[in-house]
Image (tube, helix red, strand yellow):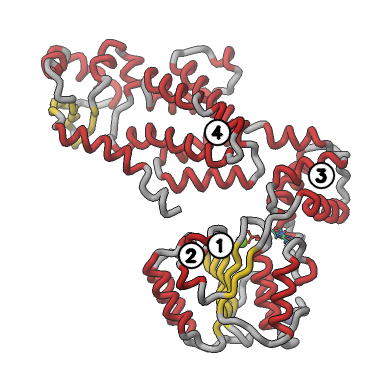
């Protein structure tokens, strides 16, 4: 049989299996019993609390072949198709990746056709707050006059970002976080079915880390059951979530290198969902930068206790920056230590910290800079001279943009041959070089790049 992860294997299939959200369940059941179905519902609440699950059960309740019911049969073709997400009448749309007007227009076109098998066409739009303004406006048009057989269920973790005009047309349900005790109960049920033995403390450790999200708790339970021997202890959970694997740090750097704020934030949400401790993650980042500095300065692998492959990766990142820049980065990082330790919002602090790092990576990417680090290894003197220039390759000519400082050009010209030699070595080909003075305007542009880093953050 196909192996399913706990959070899918134990996804509730009936209203009565949903825990924690009693109010929501009761109200939805009443609506079905009294045949008062609204056109649109808004399910808001933190991730992993049952929004998608409830939306699917509700869709089954509306469409089950046995008739509209609070106990969908789960046996008929319609129920099965909905459970497997391949029903043609129940359409799940991820609002985060289908944000635009075109997607909503297409939805509107299709909504004009009757349901194929069921009584209703149910649109479940997840993370609906991510839609663009135009998309919301288009959506509003259908909401104003929906065909009688069309029902909407919007799910969101961020209801404040959903326009009031939309909210006012929905019946709203707030999903709440589960308490530690509720999560422990749920975990115990699953452990029993999976024949897992856990000490009481282990259950509580997991539940605390899950921060109200039942899914997160299930994910942690599964991970710890793979890695620890039974009976699973509280320490096992701590060990699992405390130690940040090196791979994860490299993945983080890869996201930073792409210099797209959304990728970085997505990555942070992912590690949060895995129940990782933000402070542990932070410590690993600081350690990593220290290792980068040491690798850059040719400390032997052995002394650092890392593998060849890791050495390779650390030195690649090191090559992006000068020693000076790495010192700067480390001191920025150290500044976050106390903040992270004492804040009630460690995830947010970690995000802020990542944004600070992103600036460095982004600048490197946007300016197309040949790494000063590389130049430094060949000639510290030339690296010193080039510290405040930007180097860009345009066809076979290397443009060296120098700041409007008196005497800068003379120094550069005096060392032209040496500079050329070094760049030739790095690029591994014959080149011409050209010195270009940056204008005051361009100096401004650089600061704009910094500002631009923060664009898009608003939308998220
Ligand atoms: N209220 C709940 N009762 C039981 N299990 C839940 C509940 N909320 C979440 N889960 C578990 O977490 C998984 C993901 O839930 P999901 O409905 O996708 O959450 P959301 O859409 O709110 O992020 C489910 O498959 C289930 O295993
Ligand atoms: Mg969901
Ligand atoms: Zn059915």
Q: Position of residue 150 (x, y in %)?
A: 55, 83
Q: Disc 2 marks which residue?
A: 162
Mark 2: secondary structure = loop
Q: Distance from label 3 to label 1 (Cα)?
A: 28 Å
Q: Disc 1 marks which residue?
A: 156
Which mark sits nearer the N-terminus, 4 or 1?
1
Check the image and report above or below for 271 versus 132: above
Does ligand 2 reach within 8 Å of label 1's beta carbon? no
Q: Give neighbour class at mark 2: few <14, some 14-19, many 20+ (Cα, 10 Å).
A: some
Labels 4 & 1 near each other (Cβ < 8 A): no
Q: Disc 3 marks which residue?
A: 203
Which mark sits nearer the N-terminus, 4 or 2?
2
Q: Distance from label 4 to label 2 (Cα)?
A: 34 Å
Which mark sits nearer the N-terminus, 1 or 2?
1
Q: Disc 4 marks which residue?
A: 249
Mark 3 or mark 2, whichever is nearer to me: 2
Q: Distance from label 3 to label 2 (Cα)?
A: 36 Å
Which mark sits nearer the N-terminus, 3 or 1?
1
Does ligand 1 reach within 8 Å of label 4's beta carbon? no
To which quarter of the image does residue 430 belong?
Answer: top left
State the quadrant of the N terminus.
Answer: bottom right
- Residue drawn at (13%, 28%), measured in percent from left and top? 436
Residue 36 left/right relative to 128? right
Q: Quadrant of ligand 3?
A: bottom right
């Amino acid at each position: 049989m196909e192996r399913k992860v706990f959070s899918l294997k134990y996804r509730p299939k009936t209203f009565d299996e949903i825990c924690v959200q009693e109010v929501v369940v009761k109200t939805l059941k009443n609506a079905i019993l009294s045949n008062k179905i609204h056109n649109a519902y808004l399910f808001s609440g933190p991730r992993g609390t049952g929004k998608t699950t409830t939306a699917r059960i509700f869709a089954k309740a509306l469409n089950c072949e046995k008739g509209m019911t609070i106990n969908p049969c789960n046996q008929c073709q319609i129920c099965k198709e909905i459970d497997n997400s391949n029903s043609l009448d129940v359409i799940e749309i991820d609002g985060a990746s289908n944000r635009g007007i075109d997607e909503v227009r297409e939805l509107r076109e299709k909504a004009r056709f009757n349901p194929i098998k069921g009584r209703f066409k149910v649109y479940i739009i997840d993370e609906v707050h991510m839609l663009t303004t135009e998309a919301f406006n288009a959506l509003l048009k259908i909401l104003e006059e929906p065909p009688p057989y069309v029902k909407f269920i919007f799910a969101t973790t961020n209801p404040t970002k959903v326009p009031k005009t939309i909210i006012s047309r929905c019946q709203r349900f707030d999903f709440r976080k589960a308490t530690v005790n509720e999560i422990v109960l749920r975990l115990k049920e699953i452990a029993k079915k999976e024949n897992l033995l856990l000490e009481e403390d282990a259950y509580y450790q997991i539940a605390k880390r899950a921060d109200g999200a039942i899914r997160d708790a299930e994910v942690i339970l599964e991970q710890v059951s793979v890695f620890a021997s039974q009976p699973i202890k509280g320490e096992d959970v701590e060990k699992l979530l405390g130690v940040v694997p090196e791979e994860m740090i490299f993945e983080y750097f890869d996201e930073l290198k792409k210099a797209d704020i959304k990728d970085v934030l997505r990555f942070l949400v992912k590690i949060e969902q895995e129940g990782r401790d933000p402070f542990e993650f932070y410590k690993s980042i600081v350690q990593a930068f220290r290792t980068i500095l040491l690798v850059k300065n040719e400390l032997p692998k052995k002394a650092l206790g890392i593998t060849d492959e890791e050495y390779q990766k650390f030195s690649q990142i090191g090559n992006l920056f000068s020693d000076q820049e790495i010192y700067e980065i480390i001191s920025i990082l150290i500044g976050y230590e106390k903040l992270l330790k004492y804040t009630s919002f460690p995830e947010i602090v970690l995000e802020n910290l990542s944004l600070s790092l992103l600036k460095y990576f982004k600048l490197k990417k946007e300016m197309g800079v040949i790494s000063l680090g590389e130049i430094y290894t060949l000639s510290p003197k030339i690296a010193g001279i080039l510290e405040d220039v930007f180097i860009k390759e345009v066809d076979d000519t290397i443009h060296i943009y120098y700041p409007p400082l008196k005497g800068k050009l003379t120094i550069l010209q005096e060392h032209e041959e040496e500079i050329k030699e070094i760049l030739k070595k790095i690029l591994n080909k014959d080149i011409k070089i050209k010195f270009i003075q940056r204008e005051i305007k361009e100096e401004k542009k650089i600061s704009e790049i910094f500002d631009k880093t923060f664009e898009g953050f608003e939308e998220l």
